[in-house]
Amino acid sequence: MSNNPRCLYNNTFEGFIAESDRSVLGELIEAFHGAALTTAIEAFRGEIIIMRDVLSQFDDKDGRIIFEYNIPRLGKRIDVVLLCSGIIFCLEFKVGESHILEADVDQVLDYALDLKNFHKFSENKIIVPVLVATEYSAFSTTIRMSGYDKKVVNPLVTGKTNLYGVIEKTLSAFPNEEPVNPNWIISPYAPTPTIIEAARTLYENHSVEDITRHEADDVSTDRTISYILDVIHRSKDHKEKSICFVTGVPGAGKTLVGLDVAIKQTYQGHDSPVEDETATYLSGNGPLMAVLTEALAQDNYKKSQAKKDKKKLSDSRREVSEFIQIIHRYRDNMLAKIKNPVENGILEIDPDKAVKMAKAGFGEIDPVVIFDEAQRTWTQKRLADYLKRGGTFGNKLKVPNFPVSEAAFLIWSLDQREEWATIVCLVGGGQEINTGEAGISEWIKAINEHFPYWKVYISPKLTDPEYAEGKVNELLKNNLNVTYSDDLHLAVSLRSYRTEKLSAFVHALLSFDSSAAELYLEIKDRYPIVLTRDMAKARKWIHEKALGTERTGVLVTKESARFKPLAIHILPPDEDDAVHWFLEDKTDTRSSNYLEDAATEIQVQGLELDYTCLLWDADMRYENGTWKFYTFNGKNAWNELKDDTESKQDRRKYMLNAYRVLLTRARAGMIICIPSGNSNKTPTGFWEDSTRLPEYYDGTYSYLKGLGIEEV
């Protein structure tokens, strides 16, 4: 039968049985992308024989069999899908295997959950994941739901001998199901990949068109990507310098947009980069870059091994690092070209340190640079202090009296190009979380003061209060090169795929907006948010919710201090620790899934988990209708940040934003643990632990409970 782009083969049961094994195998091999390896061909042959034997025993000749159904979010294919009597069976084969591995069970459950969450014509159907280790002698005898939502059956395991019996028993358990939609194979598919999954797919395939929620009317990632590419092409054609500011709610896909623009611009449909038109993706977020780089490198290495390439893992890491870079290294490359020391506060190229190229001028090779989390670039003071002592990245070059902010220096760097250049700034609102992070106003001030001839393309949302303190209109009122476009704002969260209103709820919660309780009622059934005062209950809730390879983790702010009594350890700041925390599976104690090491906002910004536990400490407390902020002295007391100096105001803003980041990390649901504190006293009447008094926590708990958040 003719193939569908979503799979390698599909047919009715009757049509499949009527075809010869050779014919079906030929169709599978012909539709296979690339050269089918011997192991794949042997697996296909074994699956065909087994399925012919099983289906010949069924009366339902109109059921459908589908081989190698594509799951783009996971970058994988389901070996066999059966649509039979209104039920969807996902079959994962391990041909020749006689043992059941937990990782294989998780794999087939992941397929079922993916269909349930993102495949339109599967969302209300019974889905049955089945692992078939062909030589396995036992088989599942109990049919029960996975606990997910009464529609996904707990994974069944069997060998080839008992596969028919397992399927027949399942059909008997659900006898009255409505038929599956006849267009199931071409159903709208609206995946929302994690940033790691998306990056892998983009990097390997040079395409994003099948991995995001295009069926959702208000998801605008495609429009945003197209608009940015148009700006780039216009800048090249007119030999202009341009800068785009892209805004988005937390989890809206800003990083995904940046990665896709970088790849599309670099390759432009070709297999190799287009000379003098390439793009580089930059971020100052060390943990994000470390995790993405390692994830891409490992994936690239595994695929090379499967192709019998002799590439080493170090080769894959080097290849990936050419595409995505930590911003400090890019900055240091340009610093090495300037006259040092800087005189009269003016940056100048030192001709003895740099070679002028025909198109790149004294700039770097890439004419397009994407800066992720642009609001986190450094102020002039922080960068000057850093360079005065020589820094810790790159060449440790000392530059005394550095005169400009990081934003101004990055624009200056691209301005050194001879013909054209485009900067794309990806901006998260209210997500400055560290001292010395300048916010987006620094970029605009740099344009106004030093680069007024640059074309500015800007999201209208950049005028909202959480961006540049609401001063964008004022800062840009005299700039005649500004173009506003709604296409530069991403309004829908792709991270929290079960609800598009999570970011609105979090904003309302943190700002005491009266809509918070109503928003909670709207999202709680699809996106569970619950409260507890007991970490043991929090861990139990997460373990019960997470299925397959869904990722879990405990989160705390970096200002948190009294977590040891709750058996929580803070993840060390080393980037290798973040890599293990995010990438290792549940067999490794370094994994986030063990719920032992808690990550902070510094380590998780830009990344995500499926289920989270936010451990809310006494650093930010609800008191008398407002937030009060405290820092721990490291010994015996919390001190309130109540001075109204600019530095204290900034620190309070960073602490509030830290909770905004942590409250928006979960894709599927979260539990907030607010400890009860320690109410015990010594025999002499003193507090047993004066750093964990109940009053430090009770106000916050009562506020969240008052919003209607359910307690477990």
Image (cartoon, rainbow, N blue to C red):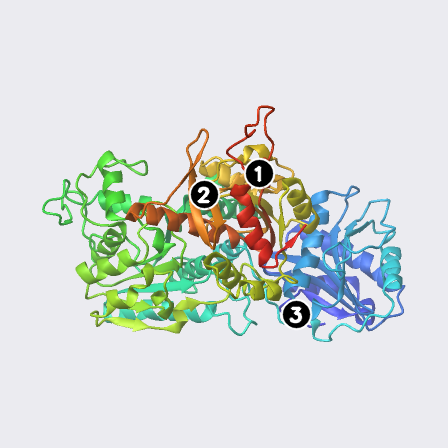
SS of the residue under disc 3? helix
Mark 1 to mark 3 CA distance (whole Å): 46 Å
How far is the residue under mark 2 from the one under mark 1?
Answer: 46 Å
Q: Residues within 10 Å of mark 2 (few under 14, many from 20)?
A: some
Q: How many marks?
A: 3
Q: Quadrant of residue 36?
A: bottom right
Depth order, front residue of 15/285? 285
Residue at the spot of label 2: 317
Name the mark nearer the viewer: 1 or 3.
Answer: 1
Label 2 or label 1, whichever comes before in sequence order? 2
The mark nearer the N terminus, 2 or 3, is 3
In the figure, 495 relative to 581: above or below?
below
**Residues at marks 2 and 1 touching, judged by CB atoms closer than 8 Å:** no
Residue picked out by circle 1: 677
Q: Mark 3 = which residue?
A: 120
Q: Quadrant of residue 116?
A: bottom right
Q: Residue at x 67, y 64 (%)?
A: 8
**Residue 548 in the image: x percent, y percent?**
68, 50
Kind of residue at disc 2? Arg
- Measured in 3D between alpha carbons, the distance from the residue under mark 2 to the one under mark 3, in whole angstroms, is 37 Å
15 in relation to 108, above or below: below
- On the image, the x and y values in percent for residue 385 come to 24, 39
Q: Amino acid at mark 1?
A: Gly
Q: Are the two marked residues, 1 and 3, in contact with CB atoms closer than 8 angstroms?
A: no
**Residue 660 picture location, percent across and down:** 47, 53
Q: Position of residue 380 (x, y in %)?
A: 24, 47
Provide the secondary structure element on which disc 1 rests: loop
